Amino acid sequence: MKDAAPASAPETFYLKDYTPFGFEVEAVALTFKLAATTTRVISKIRFAPKPDAADPRFFLHGEALNLIWAKIDGQEVTPQMVNGGLECTVPGQPFTWEAEVEIDPQGNTALEGLYMSNGMYCTQCEAEGFRKITYYPDRPDVMSTFTVRIEGSEKVMLSNGNPGTTGDGFAEWHDPWPKPAYLFALVAGDLINHPDRFTTKSGKDVELNIWVRPGDEGKCAFGMEALKKSMTWDEEVYGREYDLDIFNIVAVDDFNMGAMENKGLNIFNSSCVLASPETSTDANFERIEAIIAHEYFHNWTGNRITCRDWFQLCLKEGLTVFRDAQFTSDMRSAPVKRIDDVITLRARQFPEDGGPLAHPPRPEEFQEINNFYTATVYEKGAEVIGMLKRLVGDDAYYKALDLYFDRHDGQACTIEDWLKVFEDATGRDMTQFKLWYSQAGTPRVKVSESFVGDTLTLTFEQETAPTPGQPTKDPRVIPIAVGLLGANGDEIQPTTVLEMTEAKQSFTFTGLAAKPVASILREFSAPVVLDRQMGNAERAFLLAHDTDPFNRWEAGNALATDTRLRMVLNGAAPDANYLDALTKLVRDDSQDPAFRALVLQPPSQAQIAQVLFEQGHTPDPEKIHDAAETFAQSLAQALSDSLPRLYAATTVDGPYVPDAEGAGKRALNGAVLSLLSRLDGGAAAAKQFEAADNMTLQYAALACLLRAEKGADQSQAFFDQWKEDRLVMDKWFALQVATAKPENAAQTARALTKHALFTIKNPNRFRAVMGALAGHHAGFHHISGAGYSLLAENLMALDSLNPQTTARMCAGFQTWKRYDETRQRLIQTELEKIAGLNGLSRDTSDMVTRILE
Ligand code: 0A1
Ligand code: ZN
């Protein structure tokens, strides 16, 4: 199914070259005659030439298609095959294009277009997969209604929209809402549904289904509840109602990403929808709830209003991530969600923004759009919307959103359209704010304070380092949320948003009786690195007193980071004052368990490396690892008296419920168990493993045991218990790599690739092992180079089968230039090996080339 290697250098696409398609597509009718290796797709499409088209060429995208015949207005034609599709001479008035193509779903291991997963047919068309199904103007600004007829012997045959006639061996579907081809979907297989219903606020009755493989029907209830909550939330918060008679979700085992928002037929990686207390952790439940919401919210932000071109991807993704984060905050704990999101942003987006793959949320050029489904487009895209909301205020934000939905429903839009609704709704000029969409890189904001008389002056300076293609940067609008605390911990100035617009700017607070402690960048009000010289006493004060939960956590995080940096750089011992502040907080039962768990969660080793890099040091993975170990051991010692009591006190009684409260308690319980396991040789963990009636507790216990190198029996028991459950097995594969000693990580991963249940073809399994390796900071960067070469070897093996997943996982190498020369050389050798692979895919070639530059 893979195309031959491109003969010439791959084409680069530019935002500035945008030209609309020269034809309207009035209606699309597709007939699928399903057969595993020889599916026939017959298309009938009504085109109307646009009178003043800038590009009158009739070009249809097509890839890996076998054209059987093509007709225009019933007359057979012979189109000209060109690079990436076909061209044809067409009439100057509306006409009907018909074509029949043959495709091979079974041979499609790239999981893009129509493919098979465990005997079931399914599709993935975003971004440019529809062109692997039939010849079509496969671009998001071409929108049309679709009628689909599926012929086959499958029990269940689904497509977008509302069901039409169904009979023996066929099913018909009609989607009345015009959509781009990337939202097309088809599923056919032996599936079982978990049904439900929802009545929208205007009284429309909607049939809901989650379709799964037989055996998985017991894992749908949670997803269904999440779906209904999402539907209600979008009505209440954004006034958005569902617009079809039916909403289908399908779980698929082989899927490159998390899930896909196809109109009325969302397709999910089974790991992002199937859940049960016995097989899923608290983190899985929360993630599933968020992804179901995310895909559902796309129905308005993405589907009803879509993107004009793929440069505008963050228009739908940033907004939808922002909306799903709001939803999770409302359903669970807003501070915990914010802290988790910032941890993720720093772990995934900051390294991207500071390395060779840096790009603005709205890139201006790309070679392979699939490589731009990035943390920058998604997570930074969402941060940008958070800043907008903070700057204009809640009321104006929702007013602008109402205007956006009213004005642009049914259209394919741009970031300019998006910002214009804010300008029109608020009267603000968004010119400078737009820089957030066009400039890459994370601004570094340096703050200094002075207190004279009764006035506190905060002076901020912003600077953004050069990124590929952008040597200089203009100052951006940065909303900086600030509050002031008095010496006794009272808040003397509630949160106020300072609007920084200059490269250097001062703000004053007057009428202060004494020098206050400033709490700066509350709620992480902008995605920047805050450079603030601050004593540890002040940090400890904020950790104890800040009224902003994010900044309370941030103070603890800064203390933890600072201690670890000094351990790494100067060989210092763990800071006694910090240990003291931390142990006090952890022992304080009046504090929220979820918050205590977050404060106890140490900055990851990759995060320490990131901060070292930001401060101009070369991170030494071994030292970073050793410091983490020493610190955890010291903390365990310092808390040793309290650990058994804390462990007992945070145990959750009663049946498992995957809610925020229980999850918070279990998170603290897990953090305490991991410290306890450093002192008791794993005795408590072994007991917990034995008694656990849910995956959160079982998995946490196994992790502690494996880390203590005491878990061989339990690992085997876990395997025997769960070997039939592929999602739990992914956990088992990943955990062994994640808990390996650095010097054993690559070897452990290599052995797992030889395991009978390992398969390179299933992205979840591949990621379980290779993702865990790349995520094991000290293991991946072990000076032997074994981690690098194992990842490279596996990427090279996967590339010809699944370019998309291969390319995404190349990002494991993106930070290479920040390491020492030896490691750089080792990584460069591997990257060059990949780059030199015969027939390397465009996806991977694009990634490796940019990383190497
Ligand atoms: N739009 C989906 C994510 C997605 C993107 C690309 C895919 O294949 C290349 C698949 C899914 C979302 O945001 O959930
Ligand atoms: Zn999305």
Image: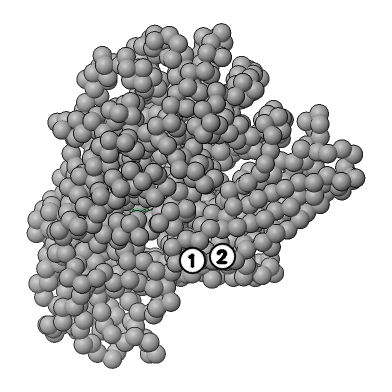
Residue at image location 35% in from the left, 52% down from the top:
260
Q: Position of residue 471 (x, y in %)?
A: 50, 66
Color style of the picture = one colour
Near-viewer residue (819 or 409)? 819
Asked if disc 1 and disc 2 are in contact, CB closer than 8 Å, the reply is yes
Q: What's the mark number on residue 81? A: none
| Viewer-side residue, 412 vs 214 | 412
Of 141 and 642, nearer the camera is 642
* Residue under pointer 1: 470
Q: Is residue 828 visible?
A: yes
Residue bearing mark 2: 473
Corner quadrant of residue 239: bottom right
**Lateral position of residue 471 relative to residue 426, left or right:** left
Does label 1 point to a residue whose CB lies under 8 Å from ligand 1? no
Q: Who's the residue at 29% across and 51% down the image? A: 828
Q: What residue is rendered at 60% in x and 66% in y?
A: 474
Of helix, strand and loop, which one carries label 1? loop
Question: Which percent across, then down, holds residue 120?
Answer: 19, 47
Please determine whether, in this image, residue 328 is positioned above or below residue 376. Answer: above
- Tag 2 secondary structure: loop
Give above or below for 758 relative to 507: above
